[in-house]
Amino acid sequence: MEIDVFTLFPGWFDWFRSQRHVANALAAGHSLGYVSYRDHTPLKGGQVDDTPFGGGAGMVLRVDVMEHALRARYGRDPVDVRGERRVIALTPGGRMLDDALAGELAAEPALTLLCGRYEGFDQRIVDHYCTDEISIGRYVLAGGELAAMVVCDTVLRKLPGALGHADSAAEESFSAALEGGPEYPHYTRPADWRGWTVPEILLSGHHEEIRRWRLEQSRRRGAGGPEGPLP
Ligand code: ADE
């Protein structure tokens, strides 16, 4: 998969690239590229944003700056680029990211993630250059960079080779194997710590019973819905 991130702060992603599962995905042939809006703005002084028409607080990322950045990367009209790959604006009001959407994105050959800043994007960017708007939650971040990292993180870990163990992503929270529910509780050594013991079934070696116990735990945890587990 080829992922391009358009941002005002490409340096933020240096740390992200060096994380193990990201580095594994890159070593396996996937790519993560960055385009800085400032490197491509046609405006003086590296300007990329402007005050909103109609008044109001904050600044808005300009459509002409976005067009220059997209053209520089793809060498053609960005209106056509969205016919070839998913071009995603990260916005607080977009489609909410969940495991199903992450799986859908992981099946794509290429993604473009556009990070906004300040008050966000000129709406014409979303209307004419993008295929999707994605949100990582109903709260407002200072910009889309952290949201882009969250999207990349969850997508990259679904790609073969990103995680150490092939099954790690298959039976995790919200996967089909767990009927879309949260993951069951995990325990490891020591089996007894301050009298806090581990459920005996997990020490029994009965794989089928363990599988059923885990599914039951996942269902119970999911019974609280999006608010989290019931007490
Ligand atoms: N940009 C600002 N806030 C955001 C959010 N919650 N999700 C995605 N992009 C954003």
Image (spheres, helix red, strand yellow):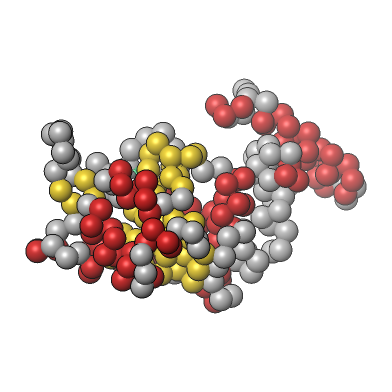
Q: Does residue 221 appear in this view?
A: yes
The number of numbered badges drawn on the structure is 0
Q: Does residue 88 lie above or below 21 as drawn?
A: above
Residue appearing at x 74%, y 39% in the figure: 179
Residue 99 sits in quarter? top right
Q: How far across and down, in percent of the image, does residue 92 sit?
A: 38, 39
Camera sees residue 16: no
Task: Kindly identify the residue that appears in the image at 39 percent across and 58 percent down.
Answer: 79
For ligand 1, the image quadrant comes to top left
Q: Who is closer to the viewer here, 30 or 197?
A: 30
Q: Where does residue 228 sit, x and y in percent of width and height?
A: 58, 29
Quadrant occupied by the N terminus: bottom right
Between residue 219 and residue 56, name the one nearer to us. Answer: 56
The quarter of the picture where the C terminus appears is top right
Say left or right for 176 vs 149: right
Above or below: residue 64 compared with residue 75:
above
Left-right relation of 92 to 207: left
Residue 111 in percent (x, y) is at 48, 60
Image x and y of residue 160, in percent: 65, 66
The residue closer to the viewer here, 13 or 43, is 43
